[in-house]
Structure formats: structure tokens, C-alpha cells
Amino acid sequence: MTTTTSAGTRKLTIARAMAEATAQEMRNDPRVFVMGEDIGPLGGVFGNTRGLYDEFGPERVRDTPISETAFIGAAVGAASDGMRPIVELMFVDFFGVCMDAIYNLMAKNTYFSGGKVKVPMVLMTSTGGGYSDAGQHSQCLYGTFAHLPGMKVVAPSNAYDAKGLMTAAIHDDNPVVFMYHKSLQGMGWLGTEKGATVPVPEESYTLEIGKAAVVREGHDVTLVSLAAGVHHCLRAAQALEDEGFSAEVVDLRSLVPLDRETLRASVAKTGRLIVVDEDYHSFGVSGEIIASVVEHDHACLKAAPRRVAYPDIPIPFAPTMEQWALPNADKIVDAFHQMMLS
Amino acid sequence: MQPTTEQRLWMYRHMVLSRYLEERIESLYMEGKTPVFNMAKGPIPGEMHLSNGQEPCAVGVCAHLDPEDIVTATHRPHHIAVAKGVDLDAMVAEIFGKATGLAGGRGGHMHLFDAKVNFSCSGIIGEGLGPAVGAALSRKLQGKPGVAVAFMGEGAANQGAFHEALNLAAVWQLPVVFVIEDNAWGISVAKQASTAVPRNDRRAAAYDMPGVHVADNDVEAIFSAAGEAIARVREGQGPTLIEIETARLAGHFMGDGEDYRPKGEKEGLKQRDPIPRYRKQLLDAGLLDDASDDTLVEGAHARVEAAIRFAQDSEFLPPEAALEAVFV
Amino acid sequence: MSIVITVPDDLWEGDSEGVITAWLVNDGAEVAQGDLVAEVMVEKAQYEIEAPSTGVLSITKQEDEVVEKGETIASLES
Ligand SMILES: Cc1ncc(C[n+]2csc(CCOP(=O)(O)OP(=O)(O)O)c2C)c(N)n1
């Protein structure tokens, strides 16, 4: 699986980048192991553990029963006892059956022990819709996880970031929720966002958790998003450029910690803010981003901020309804137009 | 407990109907998905879990149920919905996401709700058990007739919800029967790799309820085991757990490469396809002859074709309808 | 010398067509023998294509193109 292709040219899908980061850490650190449903010989339903079972065997790459409460709770126990487990919750929508292990144990044991107990684990989970999998298999729930204190939350938009964030997550002495969007995984059957498959260095590297990236510079408006939303923003920015406007795109990459400084600096420069989020509109990421800017300095705004988010409804199956409800580049461009009118 | 001739032919007809429905869904699902398999494409997008091979579980149990009885099913629900008498036109239209579907296209194939026959299902493993227990409690509290049956795959028996629901049903002696369709696989993970007991019916002992095992996907053995369990709950004698050895003749979902199966397994299972087996049994018993079989099969096919036409001819709801039905 | 990269005949069972879902190396880049260069998908299964030798990659079948077993998808110049 390793390649010696000339530097800067070898590309990886996010799925492969996650698997490569995990494999490199497993080679270096015997404490790292993986658990989850279908993550063994199958390599994960979304491909992000491919090759691990062959290299590390069933002792360290463990297919679990469909018992999320038990195996995520087990990861907390193993992490507190000196291991560095990586566990997978196949779809983030399934958090309902095991949330206690996540937010009452994984996220709180460090605090309850006065910082003496470390819980160095990674919870990987898939997010996102757009392929008619309906309301129990298509949610993002970024805000749900980011809302609850005690766990870091990352959501990469491309393979370079995915590898660096995965390595950083495994190194981190705190629990990290690694949310990967299905449409970015490089699994063709999910319809793949080409922009997510990018050059990735072979050697191990980390990306600091809690640092956003300005992935496109501009001065008329700041478009803020994460994961798949970043690609919608990039398309919208291109469309706006054709109209003569220059949009800056901020890829949050991490929700917890949230890089408010990068956000504020960008909006201070552009004076306009549109937040794009495939998660539900209310009580979530988009509101938090806007509040982070406005409570800091509302005077920098030339217009009221806007958001392009998922309406507050369960995700419908029918493609007509689902596509209508999802954020996309056209809606972002529209939001900008309305902003300029008002 | 032996089925009557009428029940035998009912079970056979519903197995044939369910299988033909799956075969038609399979080919329609692949429209727009070859040679490039993109789940979002074609007249039936999304995931698709077919029930081929598991029909005996559905008909053997539902033969004992009336519309007023409650059934909760799983992500693999079609055979059970057919046997429970879910409105076929509306069900197929829902699978196509159309306005005339059970939920106007909001639910899709994993979320079929037909209140007229008390049927529902969910895509979350183990989620049907609690609601079945609660519906049984509701009937008891209201003094209304009816019992509940929760279907699940063998993988669900490792969920906490399974154990909690069995205990609750047993403590309160509720009229609910738990039916495990053991097709030996949970996606790519084999039952023996995930389950501490070889047979889940043994787990009934932990909740002091009868545990019944039915081998070999045998229609009439299922009928008999389910009949006894359902008769017991109707008499107020408390819950039963049944595990049925069945077979998944399709992939976990459409597009599954099934590389995890041992070589030859699927071919072996297909040789034991329960539908030709039951057909032969009925022919041998003189309950069916070639002519009456043809009539029955044609009738079932025609019913499915009519439902598919109904779905295809239906419109989608306007997209903004997505905002409706969140609350009543 | 030019060596072609083909879809191996035994990459998957049966004679279904596949689709190139990703080129993991850019056209014109240098690759080494055994490098993973492309992914091909058949239904939900993904298969890997490796470089049969070292050389400079010249892609003839692009991403999203449908391919059959045995079909040439690129060549390597050394
Ligand atoms: C709580 C939860 N965890 C995981 C899944 C993903 N998943 C869908 S089907 C399936 C396998 C289910 O196996 P089983 O219960 O035996 O039913 P079968 O698919 O064999 O009919 C899994 C793990 C899910 N839907 N819900």
C-alpha cells in the first residue's frame, strides 16, 4: 500500500488517508488498536480501515458485535487503562444507542478525576446525506457533539487534512470525535467529491486540532463551513468570482476547539459572513459561528450574517425533497445576492 | 400446530409475492446504477436490503396475526410488511419515494409505517423491541385485544435494547413475542464471531421465558412454533423468544460484493431456497398442482406489477412538502 | 520503453464492468513499481490498480470512465 511516487503527486482518498494514518500509528505504538462493526476483513463500510486487518490481525483490529454501548464503553475503559483505542460508530445517526458511553464517560472522566484520568481515544463516525438514505442514516449532528464539553471534534474536508488530523487525534491524550463525511470518502458508490482526494505525504505528520484554514482568499464575503460544505463554498466562490465578487472560504476543520480567531480575522476583513452547514439550522454550528463573530465585534459587519443550513426537519428519503433541503453552491450564491440587496 | 390447507396456500402465496417483489425491486434498483454504481441514482436510490430467503419467517409468524396485532420490523422489512398485510401499492410507492407512498416518500424502504395494520420498522438495530413491548403494554392497559411481535436479525440480540426489552416484557408478563431471523450474518460479521451463544433462544432462560429454536428455515415448523407462542400470549401467559434459522440469499444490501462469505456458501443456500422447497411440499401433499401453482404465481406477480405501476405512475410530492409532517 | 497498465483479469470475479473512481497519481508523474495508482469500483467493491513497473505515468482512461477487465488505462514510459 505504500508508494514511493514523487513527492507532492501521490493522492489519497480520505478513506485511505485515515487508514494510512492509523496504520502508521499502529506500527509505532502497540497501544493503538481498532474496534468497530465491519472494520476488520471488510475494511470498514466506508473504507477507512482497509488493509489494517491484513497487517495487524484480529487482535488489534477487532470486528465487534452490534453492541455500541459495550464497545464504546470498552474503549473508554481501555483508554483510561493505558491503551489508545480507535473505535468506529458506523453512522453518526446511531449515537442514540450509545451516547451515554460517549458524553457521560468518554467526555467527562478526565474532568471528574480532576484531570488525573486520561481518555486518549478516537471515535470515528460517518456523517452526511445526499444519496437518499433517509433520516436515520444521513445526519451530520456536528452541533450535537460539539455542544457537549469534554471531547474534541474534527471534520476534515480533504485527505491531506484527514491524515494530519487523524494522526493528531491518535496522539492526543483527550478523546477526539473524528467525523468523516460520506460524500468525501472516495467511495464511488456514495458519489465522490473529487476535491477531497488530494496529494498526501507518505510520512507521518500532524495537523493541529483547533486550527481552521483559509482555503481561498477573498475580500467581499467570508464563507465558513466544514467537511462537505467546504466544497459547496469553493464552488460558490468560483461562481461569485465569475460575477466579479471575491469570496474567502474558511474551512473550520475542527469544531472543538473552535478557531474563533481565524473566523474573526476573516470577517473583519470581508465584513460579510455566510455560514454553510449540512447539520440542522437551529441550535447548532451555524448559530455558534455567527455568535462568535458578532459577540466579539458587530461593527465589522456590513450586513446581517446569513446561514445556509439544513432545515429543522428529519431528513426525507425522496431525492426530490432531500436535494431541495440540502445546502449547495446555488443557495450560497443566492444568500450572497440577498445580502447585497438588503 | 398444523396449518390448514387455506393457511398453507396463504403462506406459499405470500412467499411468492414477497420474492417477486424483491426481484422486481432488485432490477429496478439497478436501473441507472450500471455500470457505475452510485446509490443516489435510479428510480430507487439509497440503501436497499432485500429479504430473499427469509420469507418463511414472515409468513410462518404473520399467518397467526390479525390487522389489530402489532408488528415491528427492521431495516430488512419487505417480506414482513407483505405478510402483515401492509398496503402494497402504498408500500411500493414509498420505496420509490412517491406522493402516494405510506409517508409521501419521507421514509423510504427502511421506514415503512402502516397504522391500519399496525406495522412499523426502523433502520436502527434493535430498535423495534421497545416499541413492541410498549404496544403490548398499551393493549393490556386498555384491555384491548391484540398482541405484539418484534422481528429482528440475530445481530440485534447483542444490543442492550434486546436484553432490556426481554426483561421488561417478562417482568410485566406482556403479550409480546420476539422473533429472531438468524441469517448467520450481520453485514460481514458471522454470528459465531459476534455472539457468545450458538443459539439465541438460549438467552430466553435469562429472562425466564420460553425460548424456541426453529431449524432449517422450515415454513411449517415456524408456523407451529409461532402459533404456540402467539396462542400463549393471547391467553396472557407472557412472552416468548423464538430464533429461526433462515438464509439471506441476497447481499447485506444491494451492491454488496459478499467477499466475506465462504466459497460456495451462497450456492448451497440457493439450493435450499425455501420457496421451491415449499412448493414441492405442497405439490407432494396434493394441495397444489402445476395448473393451480401457475395461477397462484401469476396472480402474485400481477399484484406486484400493479403495485409497481402504481408507484411509477405516481408523482413526487413538491419538494417543500419536506417541511410538513414533522408535527401533527 | 513503454509498459501499459491494464485492469488485471483477476481483479474481480465475473465479467462486470468497473469504473475508475480515482487516479491517485497525476498524469505525467513518476511512479515506482508496485505503487498504488488507481481505484476501480465494481458495484460497492473497490479494487486497487498497481503500477507494473517504474516510469512516468500517462493516463488514457480518466476518472469516471467505465473499464473492462484487460483494458488498458494508462502507460508508463521509462
Ligand atoms: C444501532 C445500529 N448499529 C449498526 C447499524 C448498521 N447495520 C445495519 S444492518 C447491520 C447488520 C444487522 O445484522 P442483523 O441484525 O443480523 O440483520 P440482517 O442484516 O442480517 O438482516 C448493521 C450492523 C445499525 N443500523 N444500527
Image: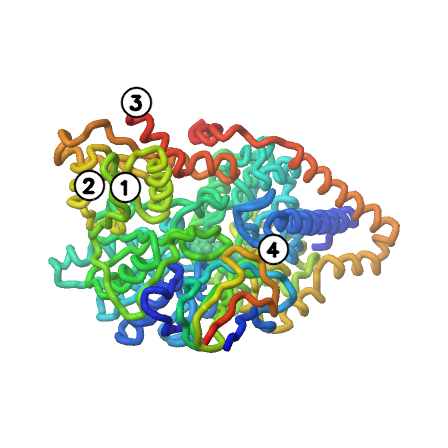
Between the C-alphas of marks 4 and 2, the distance is 45 Å
Label for residue A120?
none
Mark 2 or mark 3: which comes first in sequence? 2
Mark 2 or mark 1: which comes first in sequence? 1
For disc 3, the marked residue is A341
Between the C-alphas of marks 4 and 3, the distance is 46 Å
Cβ atoms at labels 2 and 1 below 8 Å apart: yes
Residue drawn at the location 66% of the way across and 50% of the way down: B27
Q: Callout 1: helix, strand or loop?
A: strand
For disc 4, the marked residue is B35
User: What amino acid type should be assigned to the residue bearing mark 2?
Assistant: Ser
Q: Nearer the viewer, residue B113 or C73?
A: C73
For disc 1, the marked residue is A224
Q: Callout 2: helix, strand or loop?
A: helix
Subunit that carries the residue with mark 1 = A
* Circle 4 residues within 10 Å: few <14, some 14–19, many ≥20: some
User: What amino acid type should be assigned to the residue bearing mark 3?
Assistant: Leu
Q: Position of residue A107 (x, y in %)?
A: 23, 54
